[in-house]
Image: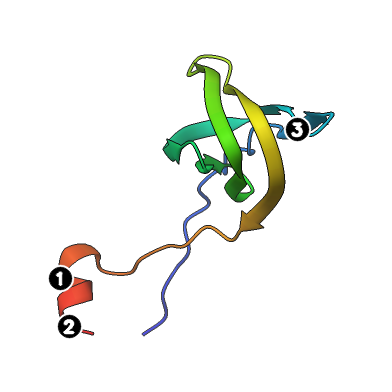
């Protein structure tokens, strides 16, 4: 039995830009949601993967859900991207592993 793939239009990912000024101010656009943050780091979801920001005395000074803009201030030590992880099967799939 063959499976037929439907022609489902894909929604293009929002443009994502990252600006770091003097390692103390970071502005990111194309942010879908902030996953977590504290004084040592922030994690946000973008259309291109997970954005991890690490440093000291970090403060999320602004997050706009409408524009998808995130502003972080503090001592920025690193910025890293992780691939978006997709789980299969939801809760039951996790139980069956």
Above or below for 22 versus 36: above
Of residues 8 and 17, the one drawn nearer to the viewer in this rendering: 17
- Give the residue at x 52% y 40%: 44
Identify the mark nearer the N-term, 2 or 3.
3
Left or right: where 93 falls relative to 58 = left
Q: Nearer the viewer, mark 1 or mark 3?
A: 3
Of residues 56 and 50, the one drawn nearer to the viewer in this rendering: 56
Above or below for 5 versus 19: below
Estimate how packed mark 2 is, as few (under 14), some (14 to 19) or many (20 or more) residues with alpha carbons within 10 Å: few
Above or below for 67 versus 92: above
For the residues labelled 2 and 1, say whether their Cβ atoms are less than 8 Å apart.
yes
- Give the residue at x 23% y 85%: 97
Identify the mark nearer the N-term, 1 or 3.
3
Return the residue at label 3: 17
Residue 82: image quadrant is bottom right
Q: Secondary structure at mark 3?
A: strand
Spot occupied by residue 11 in the image (x, y as percentages of width and height) = 58, 38
Can you say which quadrant of the picture contains the N terminus? bottom left
Q: Secondary structure at mark 1?
A: helix
Spot occupied by residue 7 in the image (x, y as percentages of width and height) = 53, 52
């Amino acid at each position: 039995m063959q499976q037929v793939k439907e022609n489902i239009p894909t929604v293009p990912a929002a443009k994502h830009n990252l600006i770091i000024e003097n390692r103390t101010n970071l502005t990111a656009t194309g942010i879908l949601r902030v996953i977590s943050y504290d004084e040592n780091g922030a994690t946000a979801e973008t259309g291109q993967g997970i954005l991890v920001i690490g440093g000291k005395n970090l403060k999320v000074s602004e997050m706009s859900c409408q524009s998808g803009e995130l502003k972080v201030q503090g001592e920025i030590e690193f910025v890293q991207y992780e691939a978006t992880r997709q789980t299969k099967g939801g809760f039951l799939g996790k139980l069956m592993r």
